[in-house]
Image (cartoon, rainbow, N blue to C red):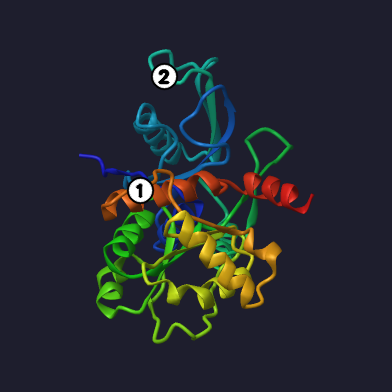
Amino acid sequence: MPEPIVYTEHPVDVLGHAVRLQSEAQRVVLITSVDIRGGAARELGSLAVVSESGGMFGYMSNGCIDRDIREQALSLLGSGKGAKTLRYGEGSPFFDLKLPCGGSLELLLDADPDLATLRAAHRDLIARRSVCIDFRPPGGEEHISFEYAPKSRLAIAGRGAVFRATVQVAEASGFETLAYSPEEADLEAVAHLCAEEPVFLSTPRARQTLPLDRFSGFLTLFHDHDWEPELLKSALMTETRFIGCLGSQKTQQLRLNNLRADGVDPGSLERINGPIGLVPSLRNAPSIAISAIAEVVGRFPSSIRQVQEADKRNAA
């Protein structure tokens, strides 16, 4: 049986896998979507890698053509050629392989990707720097460039059932999660889901240095809101793209009033969203978590292009 396809999403994970395989002297094919017409399951520039053992890490469709892509990649490795392009859907020679969403998808398969380029791109993404990678289709002088953003990061501060559930949902949604809590048991319960060691909050008055950038978001999920002011002040000092807080409308107004009285610039307070969640008045932790993360996803750019467009709007 062939190795299973690993349906991972983010370029940093695909590039990391490709670098590991190449460092183990395994041949790989790097797959990149270079043209999309009509609907598509993935965005332009999406990446996947196929190893000589038949494993596929990443995907290009919702399962309808990925197995054929893997076979095409293995065939390319066996041919000794460096690269080729494939088209699925409209204009494709594969009449028996249809794209249910219509349109067409063109892929670049590279059986000899430059290890130094992949390693440098992976290193930059790990360091939370956006990267630009050039791809050169066979037979053409024009190269194609795609820019990739670091994985979206979500720092979550809170305690109890809602805190635990929200960390779980955030991690399952593809966020790089960070956790802050005054409860050691809560931190132990979510530690395996976090990208970094969870942070124990010893006192509400301690100022935290939050590792948040423009690819990050921040949530506070406390019912005892004394823990929030210093955390929110710290978040407001960063470039974090989204700040959200648990509570009622009344709690949100009181929260803003207290921060304003504490000297926080009123313009900065507009960055604090609350009450967090798309569905109001929920009473169970999993639903609250799903509602909160759904709002974050809806407000969070999913690609570097959307990040840049949002930055332009904010600057204007």
Q: Is 61 placed above or below 280 here? A: above
Disc 1 or 2, which lies upstream in sequence? 2
* In the foreground, 273 or 216: 273
Q: Label 1 is placed on what type of residue?
A: Ser
* In the foreground, 209 or 122: 209
Label 1 and label 2: CA atoms lie apart by: 39 Å
Is 178 left or right of 129, judged from the image as shown?
left
Residue shown at the point (27%, 43%) measured from the top left: 4
Contact between labelled residues 2 and 1, with CB atoms less than 8 Å apart: no
Badge 2 is on which residue?
A: 100
**Residue 284 image position (x, y, % from top left):** 26, 52
Is 29 left or right of 258, judged from the image as shown?
left
Crowding near the residue tagged with mark 2, few <14, some 14–19, many ≥20 C-alpha atoms within 10 Å: few
Q: Is residue 91 visible?
A: yes
Is 206 left or right of 304, judged from the image as shown?
left
List the single residue furthest toward the left.
1
**Residue 142 image position (x, y, % from top left):** 73, 37
Q: Is 12 placed above or below 45 here? A: below
Residue shown at the point (65%, 41%) measured from the top left: 136
Crowding near the residue tagged with mark 1, few <14, some 14–19, many ≥20 C-alpha atoms within 10 Å: few
SS at circle 2: loop
In which quadrant is the N terminus drawn? top left
Q: Which label number is shown at residue 281?
A: 1
Q: Label 2 is placed on what type of residue?
A: Pro
Residue shown at the point (25%, 70%) measured from the top left: 189
**Residue 191 image position (x, y, % from top left):** 31, 71
Look at discs 1 and 2 and give the one toward the viewer.
1
